Amino acid sequence: MQRVIRLANKTGIVAAVALLGLLMAACGGGSTEKTFCVDSKGNTVPVDDYVCVAVDETFRPVFEVLFADFRDRNAKAFVDPLYMPEDSAISLLLRDSVRTVVATRQLTTKEKDYLVGKFNLLAKEAVVAYDAITLITNNASLDTLISKDEIQQIMQGKITDWQQLRHANGQKGKIEIVFDNNGSSTVRYMKDSLCAGQPPKGNLRAATTNEELITYVSKKPNTIGVLGVDWVGNKNDSTRLSFLSDVKIMRVGTKDSDDADDYYQPFQLYIASGSYPLTRGLFITSTDPRTRSMQRNFFFYLTDEPNHNNMGQIMILRFSQLLPYMAVQSHNVVIKRY
């Protein structure tokens, strides 16, 4: 016999996994009943083969590759990714509407306690990779060097004009800062890391997608776009040593300096060495209580627990600008700076 569970639509996003504890109970106790659910596209799929992950949309480029590779390696897997702002993804997890989330922060103690008290669910977390907050500017910009301190002053509303920057090179005009959206993890990074917990100030604009952000900056002088590094990688370059040509990728320094060599672009090497100062971790959090499920297999695929031959980590290294958490070797290469 088959049991089909239809999942509710919550806040405009199909809740892809709901009440899995009840679904597990339906499959347990020696029952021959097979439980199915309906995914976000209306397909009926086996619960144990269903992989629903709410992913911070900042990381959509690399996770499209990772999900495709995981499907190729697991023929039974039904993968149903939900890409959305980070705060929306975590909100779904806290409502038990999804059981796996990829985000740039771990759950707080209060959030973990809430999951235990409300749903009797324990959160399992692991670091997946390291991201670089990347600054892009229009190709007509005369200034591509900026220090972390200058970025902080821009976000606090203390620097508002290009002329106030050390390397303005004669560029004038009001600085416009563009984020991908108001609920973005990049906004939270600036708030927590550079603004002492206060919202960024100044001439700010929120796009609706990362693609829209890049297009806007490419057409609008005096703008600085803020986004995750994987959106600016040159997908035609297998070495991962070049970026998009539509915009300029700013070089960021840990301190104010007149020497251009003290400023770095967000290559994997400079993320690993700490030379690039705007970095953050990327985490996967799962509340799936099952020890055996395709959902749990995806967690292991990304983190290599217990041992999946590091395939998820290798894919991150080869097909993204992110730095995987696993140890990697570096080699001397010549990077042409523009």
Image (cartoon, rainbow, N blue to C red):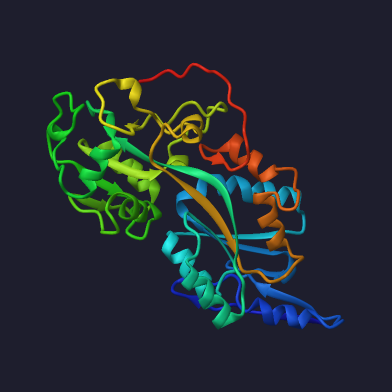
Q: Residue at x 32, y 59 (%)?
A: 182
Percent x, y of residue 294: 72, 61
Q: Compared with residue 83, is residue 68 higher up or lower down, i.e. above or below?
A: above
Q: Compared with residue 34, is residue 209 higher up or lower down, i.e. above or below?
A: above
Q: Residue at x 75, y 67 (%)?
A: 291
Percent x, y of residue 331: 58, 21
Number of callouts? 0
Of the 4 image quadrants, the one containing the N terminus is bottom right
Q: Residue at x 13, y 25 (%)?
A: 170
Q: Compared with residue 331, is residue 74 higher up or lower down, i.e. above or below?
A: below
* Left or right of 222 in this view: 109: right
Percent x, y of residue 107: 50, 64
Quarter where residue 325 is shown: top right
Q: Compared with residue 297, is residue 254 higher up or lower down, i.e. above or below?
A: above
* Left or right of 259 in this view: 111: right
Of the 4 image quadrants, the one containing the C terminus is top left
Closer to the camera in the image, 5 or 29: 29
- Using the rendered image of the protein, determine whether residue 308 is visible from the camera's viewpoint: yes
- Using the rendered image of the protein, determine whether residue 14 is visible from the camera's viewpoint: no
* Left or right of 242 in this view: 28: right
Percent x, y of residue 117: 55, 82
